[in-house]
Amino acid sequence: MLKSGKYIAEHDNGIFDRYRIVMSVKETEKSYIFELLEYVSRYSPAQMDMLFDKSKRVLISKFKGGHAMRIWSDHDFTLYPYQAGIPFHFERVNEGGSAEGNSTEKEMAKSG
């Protein structure tokens, strides 16, 4: 189960695919609630635009299809909106502003 709080996805490998997405995340028994706090992108990922086009707050059911989500630990997850384009890896942000978790632990979990 994810910890409630602020999560961030960042990518800065090139001018054409640079983005920063910050969301507040809450998990309930039946759904995930995402509230968009910050969204900076030179060329916006279309699936994120579509996900938040009607509201800054989105409710995603755990039991209905449409979006793929993989929880790696209680402090990071991967969201693949509409199962199109690219997946986004989110890490929980602690109160000091830095991402939680151990990058070596994450890479091992992803590869195996």
Image: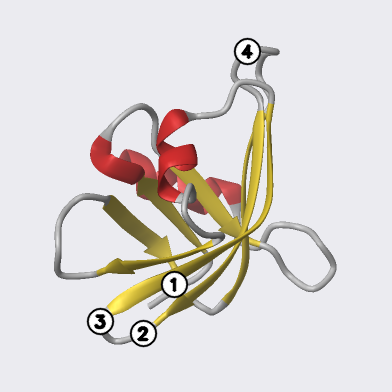
Question: Are dots 1 and 2 in contact, CB under 8 Å?
Answer: yes
Circle 4 SS class: loop
Q: Amino acid at mark 4?
A: Phe
Question: Which quarter of the image is occupied by the C terminus?
Answer: top left
Q: Which residue is mark 3?
A: 30
Circle 1 SS class: strand
The label on residue 33 is: 1
Q: How is the image coloured?
A: secondary structure
The label on residue 28 is: 2
| Residue 94 or residue 26, whichever sits in front | 26
Q: Which sits earlier in the primary sequence, circle 1 or circle 4?
A: 4
Horizontal arrangement in the rendering, residue 23 relative to residue 106 (left or right): right
Q: How many marks?
A: 4
Q: Which residue is mark 4?
A: 16
Name the residue at the bottom extreme.
Answer: 29
Question: Are dots 4 and 2 in contact, CB under 8 Å?
Answer: no
Q: How far is mark 4 from mark 3, CA to CA?
A: 36 Å
